[in-house]
Image (tube, helix red, strand yellow):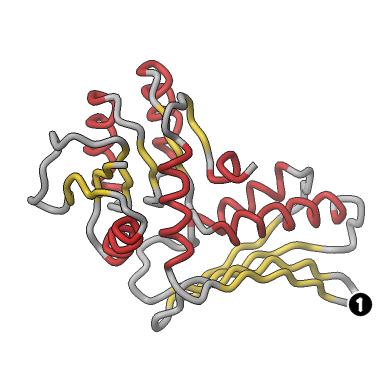
Amino acid sequence: MRILLVGYGKMGQLVEELALAQGMEIASRIDVGTGNWTAPADVAIDFSTAAALTDNFPRYVQRKLPAVIGTTGWPELVPTFRAEAERAGLGIVASANFSIGVNLFEMVVAEAARVMRQHPQYGAWIHEAHHSTKRDAPSGTALLLRDVMTGAGYDRRIDISATRAGAIPGIHTVGFDGPSDTIELTHTARDRRGFASGALLAAQWIQGRRGWFSMMDVLR
């Protein structure tokens, strides 16, 4: 599999390291002012920025190049990009978090929300913590967890808060607080390898598929 690697920051470099270890090929590394957009490739893996994605996505559509998008902070663009991908018959996997563990965590949170919707004495909250250089707050994963909970039928207010400090890879906690007790569910990332591994799994899975998918679709 030949990968067009878009965004060559920490995540892009880790994706490259794991891809080469698995016998995959990096067709080109696209970063600010560098890289070859016309290099033959089977899939693009995009860990750039939300601003860059507005320029990148039309290139995927034009080339009909399947893409795995891990960039966060662009929810308002999803309807437009999704419609463009569908018209082009393009396969896209877009997720705020490609960690396999986080996506399994989402399934657990959805089930907890389904149970808690029947117990109005419990209020819900989400707290996330990441390294000080992470741009968006709250994280895309925190917003995704909120959507998972509301999708499961939890119709009460969900408070979301964020911490940015040091080199924290990522901690997400979903809590339910009642008059007499608190229930907490937490996922803690120890490093970024889980995100990169998930992106490569998604890149293999999207081959030959058309449509707009999430990491949950990849794991089902």
The number of numbered discs placed on residues in the rendered structure image is: 1
Quadrant of the image occupied by residue 218? top right
State the residue in front, 146 or 68: 68
Instruction: Relative to 30, say whether 174 is above or below.
Output: below
Residue 53 in the image: state x and y as whole percent: 28, 42
The N terminus lies in which quarter of the figure? top left
Left or right, 92 with respect to 181, comes to: left
Which residue: 66% across, 54% down? 106
For this view, does 115 lie left or right of residue 198? right
Q: Is residue 65 above or below residue 144?
A: above
Give amino acid for label 1: Ser
Residue 80 falls in which quadrant of the image?
Answer: top left
Task: Where is residue 110? Give x, y as percent.
Answer: 74, 51
The answer to whether residue 97 is visible is no
- Residue visible at 22% across and 49% down? 26
Residue 188 in view in this figure: yes
Q: Nearer the viewer, residue 76 or 34?
A: 34
Q: Residue at x 13, y 53 (%)?
A: 32
Q: Position of residue 33 (x, y in %)?
A: 8, 51
**Depth order, front residue of 159/133:** 133
Q: Is residue 164 above or below residue 148?
A: below
Direction top: furthest residue:
87
In the picture, measured across the screen, residue 144 lies left or right of residue 123, that is left
Q: Whole-percent x and y of residue 212?
A: 48, 30
Which of 63/178 is in front?
A: 63
Q: Classify 10 Å Cα crowding around label 1: few (below 14), some (14-19), many (20 and above).
A: few
Q: In the rendered image, which quarter is residue 27 located in?
A: top left
Secondary element under disc 1, as helix, strand or loop, is loop
Q: Residue furthest front?
A: 23
Which residue was labeled with disc 1?
Answer: 180
